[in-house]
Image: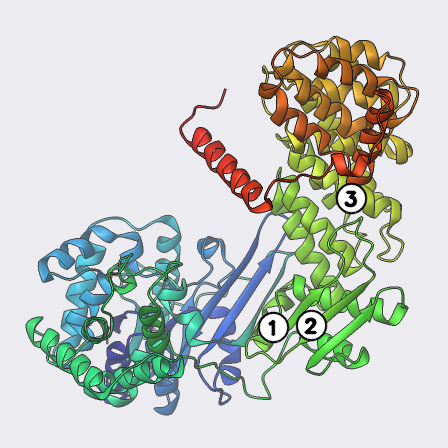
């Protein structure tokens, strides 16, 4: 007897009803379901008595790739109904798809992928033919609100059209051939008894063709396919995790199956009319709970409009989009600035109308699954429970930590590791924010969270202990940072907060390669400054003299010197980011020479070349001179200052000088301030250079600006208050308005391409 193949759409109540009726009617020997075959020996675990939704979470990691994926089930998932109904009628139930970690599924975070996402042409033609906005509305029109009579034939026709004559990709071909092998073996073993197969509708035509292909010659009797095993040396596994309707919802970014899961849950449990009425009330309740006025007349109008739209669109009962459109018409009187999300299957964009936000939330629902207490969990879950208990963090409320105390530092490390793993319910309110931050205490707030168990189970893919898992995540993020030094710095600081500074040697190689590929000095300078601070000072966090951080310092200094010498261009506003980068480079030469492969003499030679290069920007030339001056190189600052040409370059050159050699400028013997006073006094046109000069002197804090003012008074044999020279009699509001105007003009010039 040939197999009875049912093509379904994942998480479709109508398909789930069809699957349940078919199994109950045929009483098959086998029920074969699209799902990871590697958990066939754990079906009893899947059916322990969980509160749905739940998901099979799979993970895989080897030297070349890592993979995470989820196969979610809710009460109205056809696959779930197939498993439970098959067990109830005494059938042998088998999951028949390749394991989720298999290379054929390596590009997917969710093993279910609707055909409409990959072969959209046929779906678009059908949408035009039925005058609907998108494939979800089309599906409701053809399947969910229509009578169940003839449903299987409609589904077969629909999926045949979607599949068309186009060849599937290699990954789908591999999966379909594997599933067909299970079908052939089940049919051979079942004899005269039926076999029911439930797969995604896109795969049905191919599996049907593969299983109906006649045997050739003396073909051997079909045998059960082997379940692939992970490669030797890899780490792979599957666990059940609690899931939620919010994660299942397309409006929250889930791209497989159905949107608005709360609506389809009600449709499954109560029918179309009760689902429509109940959701109108649910939206009204949410809006009233947030202080929005929703009257009984509004509810009557929403129901009337929904029913009218259903009749106009030829629906026997209001469909999901009828309800949503009716609610919008009744409750929203403002102009909408963006398309409604259900017209294009999109996530809610920032600035969405509050009523629309609450409507989407009501139809999404807040249901969260719960695993049976006897469900196996990865070692990490037990390790975290034990750690939180040991550290006194197994509670809710505020936690204050003093990082100079060993016990509190251990607590801080544990909390930061949980944050690195993305486990919810642990929020740091305050604490150190960089390697040079003198803050030595932290404030945390611990709260219970419905998603914590799921997050811990999923994080178990990275390791069996909290420390190992956090280290693996950090290593992965370092690899992902690539040539983005800003991201790399953030990960390295997170590693310091986690108390993890001994990452594998290959990670040091990735860091070095990423730094060597950095293209902008500003972000790389930020990373260098942060890491240098951790390497020099942080004995509290345990990063002082860390070899891993030394690798970053060495690579960043070499790369920054190379980048600085390659910068060319005429007069332009001083670039504070690259000046900060040169300052960090100078500090590394001063305070960490023992870890550098680029010596002081090489760096000074680079700066000498930059300072003499008239094609280099003025701020960079000034910084190059200040770099050498601050490191004790020979050079006459007065002569260098006199060699700067014109008011259009003086201020920018000084920005570079002051950024690198502020202390040297203030030294009484340098003569720089006196020469600068003469230059500015003798300028024929002072105003054009004023903004750049003001920016340059911004490198001096108020106390040092007051010292400069005092020296200028003394040079002129004047008495008076230097502090008074730093104060203005102008209206502060007028100054603020002028600054805003300057910023607006600057943005406008940049936008229109009018900056030199």
Q: Secondary structure at mark 3?
A: helix
Sequence-first disc among 3 and 1:
1
- Tell me residue 199's x, y (percent): 32, 69
Q: Nearer the viewer, mark 3 or mark 1?
A: 3
Kindly identify which residue carries mark 2: 380
Q: Which circle marks residue 531 in the picture?
A: 3
Looking at this view, is 424 or 623 the one in front?
A: 623
Sequence-first disc among 2 and 3:
2
Q: Is residue 397 above or below residue 539?
A: below
Q: Is residue 635 above or below residue 300?
A: above
Sequence-first disc among 1 and 2:
2
Q: Which circle marks residue 457 in the picture?
A: 1
Cβ atoms under marks 3 and 1 closer than 8 Å: no
Looking at this view, is 185 or 146 the one in front?
A: 146
Q: Which circle marks residue 658 in the picture?
A: none
Q: Residue at x 34, y 91 (%)?
A: 89
Looking at this view, is 702 or 406 the one in front?
A: 702
Q: Residue 531: which quarter of the image?
A: top right
Q: Few, some or many C-alpha atoms within 10 Å of disc 1 (few <14, some 14-19, many ≥20)?
A: many
């Amino acid at each position: 007897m040939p197999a009875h193949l049912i093509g379904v759409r994942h998480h479709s109540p109508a398909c789930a009803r069809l699957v349940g009726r078919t199994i109950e009617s045929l009483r098959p020997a086998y029920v074969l379901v699209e799902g990871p075959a590697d958990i066939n020996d754990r079906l009893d675990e899947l059916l322990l008595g969980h509160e749905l939704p739940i998901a099979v979470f799979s993970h895989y990691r080897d030297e070349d790739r890592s993979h995470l994926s989820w196969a979610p089930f809710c009460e109205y998932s056809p696959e779930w109904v197939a498993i439970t109904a098959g067990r109830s009628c005494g059938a042998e139930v088998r999951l028949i798809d390749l394991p989720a970690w298999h290379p054929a599924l390596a590009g997917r975070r969710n093993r279910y992928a609707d055909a409409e996402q990959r072969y959209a042409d046929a779906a678009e033609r059908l949408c035009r033919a039925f005058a609907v906005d998108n494939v979800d509305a089309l599906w409701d029109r053809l399947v969910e609100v229509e009578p169940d009579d003839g449903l299987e034939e409609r589904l077969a026709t629909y999926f045949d059209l979607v599949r068309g004559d186009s060849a599937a990709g290699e990954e789908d071909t591999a999966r379909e051939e594997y599933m067909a092998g299970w079908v052939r073996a089940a049919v051979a073993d079942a004899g005269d008894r039926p076999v029911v197969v439930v797969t995604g509708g896109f795969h049905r035509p191919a599996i049907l063709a593969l299983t109906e292909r006649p045997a050739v010659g003396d073909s051997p009797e079909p045998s059960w396919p082997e379940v692939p095993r992970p490669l030797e040396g890899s780490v792979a596994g599957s666990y059940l995790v609690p899931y939620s309707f919010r994660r299942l919802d397309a409006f929250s970014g889930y791209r497989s199956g159905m949107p608005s899961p709360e609506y389809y849950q009600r449709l499954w449990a109560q029918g179309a009319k009760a689902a429509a009425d109940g959701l109108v009330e649910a939206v009204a309740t949410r809006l009233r709970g947030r202080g929005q006025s929703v009257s009984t007349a509004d509810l009557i109008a929403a129901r009337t409009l929904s029913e009218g739209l259903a009749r106009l669109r030829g629906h026997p009962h209001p469909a999901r989009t009828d309800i949503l459109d009716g609610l919008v018409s009744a409750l929203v009187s403002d102009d909408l600035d963006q398309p409604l999300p259900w017209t294009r299957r999109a996530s809610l964009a920032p600035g969405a109308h509050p009523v629309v936000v609450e409507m989407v939330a009501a139809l999404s629902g807040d249901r969260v699954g719960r695993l049976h207490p006897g469900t196996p969990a990865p070692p990490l879950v037990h390790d975290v429970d034990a750690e939180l208990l040991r550290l006194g963090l197994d509670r809710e409320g505020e936690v204050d930590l003093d990082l100079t105390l060993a016990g509190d530092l251990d607590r801080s490390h544990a909390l930061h590791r949980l944050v690195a793993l993305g486990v919810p319910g642990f929020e740091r309110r305050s604490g150190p924010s960089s390697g040079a931050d003198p803050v030595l205490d932290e404030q945390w707030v611990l709260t219970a969270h419905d998603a914590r168990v799921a997050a811990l189970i999923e994080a178990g893919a990275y390791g069996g202990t909290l420390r190992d898992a956090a280290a693996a995540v950090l290593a992965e993020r370092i690899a992902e940072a690539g040539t983005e030094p800003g991201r790399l710095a953030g990960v390295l600081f997170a590693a310091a907060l986690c108390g993890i500074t001994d990452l594998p040697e290959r990670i040091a190689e990735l860091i070095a390669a990423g730094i060597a590929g950095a293209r902008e000095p500003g972000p790389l300078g930020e990373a260098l400054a942060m890491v240098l601070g951790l390497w020099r000072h942080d004995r509290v966090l345990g990063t002082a003299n860390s070899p891993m951080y030394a690798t970053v310092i060495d690579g960043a200094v070499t790369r920054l010197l190379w980048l600085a010498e390659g910068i060319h261009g005429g007069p332009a506003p001083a670039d504070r980011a690259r000046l900060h980068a040169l300052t960090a480079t100078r500090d590394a030469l001063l305070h960490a020479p023992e870890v550098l492969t680029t010596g002081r003499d090489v760096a000074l030679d680079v700066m000498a070349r930059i300072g003499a290069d008239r094609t280099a920007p003025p701020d960079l030339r000034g910084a190059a001179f200040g770099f050498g001056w601050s490191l004790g190189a020979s050079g006459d600052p007065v002569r260098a200052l006199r060699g700067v040409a014109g008011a259009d370059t003086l201020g920018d050159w000084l920005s570079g000088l002051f950024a690198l050699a502020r202390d040297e400028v203030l030294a009484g013997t340098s003569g720089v301030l006196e020469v600068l006073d003469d230059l500015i006094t003798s300028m024929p046109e002072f105003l054009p250079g004023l903004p750049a000069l003001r920016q340059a002197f911004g490198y001096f804090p108020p106390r040092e600006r007051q010292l400069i003012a005092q020296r200028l008074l003394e040079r002129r044999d004047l008495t008076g208050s230097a502090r008074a020279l730093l104060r203005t009699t102008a209206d502060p509001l007028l100054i603020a308005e002028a600054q805003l105007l300057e910023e607006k003009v600057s943005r406008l010039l940049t936008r229109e391409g009018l900056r030199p």
